[in-house]
Amino acid sequence: MAIGRKEVGHIAALARLSLTDEEAQRLIKDLNAILGYVEKLDALDTKGVEPTSHTLEVTNAFREDVLRPFKEREKILKNSPARVESFFKVPPISEGVSST
Amino acid sequence: MAVPTYHTIRDLSKALRERKVSSVEITREYLQRIEQLDDRIKAYLHVNADAALKDAEAADAAIEKGEASRLTGIPLGIKDVLCIEGVPTTCGSKILKNYIPPYSATVIEKLRKERVVFLGKLNMDEFAMGSSTENSRFQVTRNPWDLDRIPGGSSGGSAAAVAGGMCAASLGTDTGGSIRQPAALCGIVGLKPTYGRVSRFGLIAFASSLDQIGPMTRSVWDAAALLTVIAGHDPKDSTSVPRETPDYTEGLEEGLRGLRIGIPKEYFIEGMDAEVEVRVQEALKAMEEAGAQMVEISLPHTDYAVATYYIIATAEASSNLARYDGVRYGYRDPSATTLRKMYEETRSEGFGTEVKRRIMLGTYVLSAGYYEAYYRKAQQVRTLIRDDFKAAFEKCDVIVTPTTPTPAFKVGEKADDPLQMYLSDIFTISVNLAGLPGISVPCGWTKRQLPVGIQFIGNLFGERTLLRAAYGYELLAPFSERYPDIIRTV
């Protein structure tokens, strides 16, 4: 299951990363080396083995569905790179629309 | 200046409450040592001297009124992965360079109630991804025992600061060994509690089924005292377990006699550094002579742990790190003209090489067509690794292994080979996969004066037995007063 230029481009798009050619080349090498190493798991017969997603004894944690408003809205908004009043501002969502 | 006036929290706490010293005096001492040493060690990303002195004044006032707990007035450093309200929190990443958290982590709130002193934020591998702290986007922390070497990672700043006398103790986080490995390489104590024991609210997530917060200290008692405060159920973290948490300093002195110590044969492998092996064997012998019963055990799936970990941890990381999109906080590429480009440019510039590598790997193993072959397979092997430990704990009370296969390596030595770097965590990773508590305790030094650590592994929620064993060993090999030479040069 070797990874090539096309696969790296596809994964980068899924992960919302844009890679330089140099980065892509390096990742092809690294990812293939790491995936080659993890192939050792194939040697284990795991037929019928339940997967472990976490090691907790609890399966769910319920609470009352009540609002607990956070009163420091300004402290949150201050961290935003761009804002308009109490909104986060982002570039146009559609391609081809110019930013104002 | 020389070594710290008080070596441990235990001694300092007593002196504070007996008014032999004030928290302001002690805080000044630590701040001064940071000023004199940290331009060479580079453990701190952010030192908050004014706020620390205010914390110290408040602590002294509480002591004056007789309201002191045993942690009141103790100066601590905090790994920069934990949010402190109003204090820059970067996670070692440029993508969070200007982030000021609007709230504090639960562990920070708990420590504040005890009136500890927060000295500042400690360096780490970006998003806790690394074993050397070389992946920090801001600076490379040096091992105080040899400035040409790494302090371990990802909590390298937390370990170096404690080893270098630049805080009385610190908090770190451990996803695959990130507390225990740097503790071992810097000659201090590092405790990773059971998964679910400590609330992670306010901890910036890396791999959510593995991450755990824990103390990094100069003694086992200190680790127990800090755990006592930070442990416990928190409604804000649904993975924190609603179980009673005792005072972990009680019962430490029950000793090694009668304890069954399991020695897994798979942890004494080829390629292990000869001096590390000698130090660990000496420690085992000393514990046996002190009355512990040695039991040979087997953890047959040990060899699969690193592979399992790098599938599970990267998959979870790729999901957790999707939130860094340049919209609500942190860095944003200012030039992007569309939303999609803004996401891509922000993330590509904001994240460093190792983080991108892991996001790519994690995205791949979760992507359509590969999920079953990689992610599900790894989760199944995780079950086998858990079952190994379950079977082992029927034969023993605590398991003992080396913490790392080698002492601290040189800066740059493994930086270009991710797989070699990953393999340096070979002895610590299984513990996270199985959710168990583990502690690294110093067990000696090599001829080149590099620390060696020994790891104790406990059963699920078995911190008391774990700490009793570690404390029993520490009495046989007490190193809390041993400091690197650099501390005497200033």
Image (spheres, coloured by chain):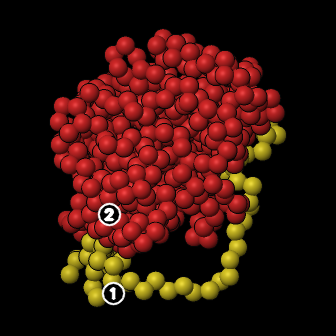
Chain colours: A yellow, B red
Q: Position of residue B244 (x, y in %)?
A: 70, 60
- Chain at numbered mark 1: A
- Chain at numbered mark 2: B
Q: Position of residue A54 (x, y in %)?
A: 67, 51
Which residue does the image show at 68% across and 82% down from the upper left? A64
Q: Amino acid at mark 1?
A: Ser
> Neighbour class for label 2 at 10 Å: few (<14), some, many (≥20)?
many
Compared with residue B377, is residue A38 higher up or lower down, i.e. above or below? above
When asked about the image quadrant of residue B16, the answer is: bottom left
Say if mark 2 contacts mark 1, CB within 8 Å.
Answer: no
Which residue does the image show at 69% across and 37% down from the upper left? B254
Residue B75 numbered tag: none
Q: Position of residue A61 (x, y in %)?
A: 70, 68
Compared with residue A35, is residue B232 higher up or lower down, i.e. above or below? below
Compared with residue B2, is residue B464 higher up or lower down, i.e. above or below? below
**Quadrant (top left, top right, bottom left, bottom right) of the C terminus of chain B:** top left
The residue at which mark 2 appears reads as B56
**Quadrant (top left, top right, bottom left, bottom right) of the N terminus of chain B:** top left
Q: Which secondary structure lies at badge 1? A: loop
The residue at which mark 1 appears reads as A86
Say if residue B10 shows up in the picture. yes
Q: Position of residue B384 (x, y in %)?
A: 74, 35
Marks 2/1: CA distance?
37 Å
> Neighbour class for label 1 at 10 Å: few (<14), some, many (≥20)?
few
* Horizontal side, residue A34 vs residue B446: left or right: right
Q: Nearer the viewer, mark 2 or mark 1?
A: 2
Q: Which secondary structure lies at badge 2? A: helix
Say if residue B421 shows up in the picture. no
Q: How many marks?
A: 2
Q: Amino acid at mark 2?
A: Ala
B439 or B253: nearer the viewer: B253
* Horizontal side, residue B8 vs residue A90: left or right: right
